[in-house]
């Protein structure tokens, strides 16, 4: 498998993580995993703050105030969007340090503004520099990054498309394939959406590998959620029993 991430990462600091980020492509289980982690933190007596990707207003999403928030290439340059995102993350970290709750984030390290930067056809160097800078910004929270990935990204995208149906596929195609990255490459229809996510996964695999943070990669094609949840609980040093 080209550019596959490691299935485990560093174990993290002795103190509890003050931020958990769950990453993966659409339909990979980010939201479900985010809710599971928040619930288990709360059961262990720790206040948790689950932040879904659709939260509005979102504390770190840099496109929220743009006129075309879902098509930021109409309103901003990649450089402007990256700078805006880092500023929002810095404010978020400062606020989190003042509070007691552990934020549990659905995406936003990769799936969010980085996706927009790719769609905007940002230079690779800019995207790598952006994530390097973002990792530095969030380091004071001793974050844990959980990366849900699938060995066969084509099959994974086809599966989520089959689950969510033609209307959802049309929405994704009409939105994402109108972006500069996809238009320049001639991506069309479902096959174009799959090609886009191949590109995205190559990028996020490379970015995940270089993250200087506590991290855990889980290949979840088998959908064996009890096993995956056990890995997550061990990484968070939480009790295995519910």
Image (cartoon, grey):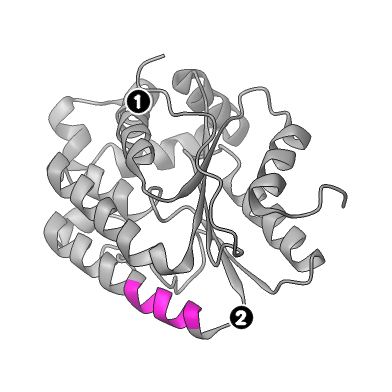
Identified at 22% across, 45% down, the residue is: 128
Q: Is residue 91 magenta?
A: yes
Residue segment shown in magenta: 90-97
Residue 122: image location, x then y, percent:
15, 46
Identified at 36% across, 45% down, the residue is: 211
Q: Nearer the viewer, residue 221 or 209?
A: 209
Identified at 38% across, 53% down, the residue is: 112
| Residue found at the very far bottom of the displayed protein | 98
> Mark 2, residues whose alpha carbon is within 10 Å: few (<14), some, or many (≥20)?
few
SS type, badge 1: helix
Is residue 77 at least partly visible in the picture?
Answer: no
> Mark 1, residues whose alpha carbon is within 10 Å: few (<14), some, or many (≥20)?
some
Q: Are marks 2 and 1 in contact (CB under 8 Å)?
A: no
Residue 177: image location, x then y, percent:
28, 36
Residue 179: image location, x then y, percent:
22, 42
Q: Is residue 203 above or below residue 142?
A: above
Q: Nearer the viewer, mark 2 or mark 1?
A: 2
On the rendered structure, is 166 left or right of 211? right
Q: Is residue 172 above or below residue 102?
A: above
Q: Is residue 188 above or below residue 140?
A: above
Q: Nearer the viewer, residue 161 or 106?
A: 106
Identified at 68% across, 62% down, the residue is: 38
Give the quadrant of the N terminus: top left
Q: Is residue 13 above or below residue 176?
A: below
Residue behind mark 1 = 198
Residue behind mark 2 = 100
Q: Is residue 108 magenta?
A: no
On the rendered structure, is 87 left or right of 172? left
Q: CA distance from mark 2 to mark 1?
A: 38 Å
Q: Quadrant of residue 113?
A: bottom left
């Amino acid at each position: 498998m080209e550019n596959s991430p490691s299935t485990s990462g560093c174990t993290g600091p002795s103190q509890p993580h003050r931020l958990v980020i769950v990453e993966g492509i659409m339909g990979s289980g980010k939201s479900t995993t985010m809710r599971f982690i928040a619930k288990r933190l709360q059961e262990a007596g720790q206040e948790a703050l689950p932040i879904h990707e659709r939260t509005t207003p979102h504390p770190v999403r840099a496109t929220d105030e743009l006129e075309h928030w879902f098509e930021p290439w109409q309103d901003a340059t990649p450089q402007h969007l990256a700078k805006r995102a880092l500023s929002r993350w810095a404010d978020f970290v400062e606020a989190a340090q003042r509070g007691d709750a552990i934020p549990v984030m659905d995406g936003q390290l990769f799936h969010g503004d980085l996706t927009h930067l790719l769609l905007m056809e940002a230079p690779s160097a800019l995207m790598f520099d952006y994530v390097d800078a973002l990792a530095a910004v969030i380091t004071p929270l001793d974050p844990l990054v959980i990366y849900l990935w699938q060995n066969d990204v084509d099959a994974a995208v086809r599966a989520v498309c089959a689950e969510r149906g033609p209307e959802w596929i049309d929405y994704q195609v009409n939105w994402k394939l109108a972006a500069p990255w996809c238009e320049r490459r001639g991506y069309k229809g479902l096959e174009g959406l799959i090609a886009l996510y191949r590109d995205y996964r190559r990028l996020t695999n490379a970015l995940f590998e270089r993250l200087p943070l506590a991290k855990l990669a889980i290949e979840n094609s088998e959908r064996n959620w009890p096993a995956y949840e056990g890995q997550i609980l061990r990484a968070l040093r939480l009790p295995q029993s519910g």
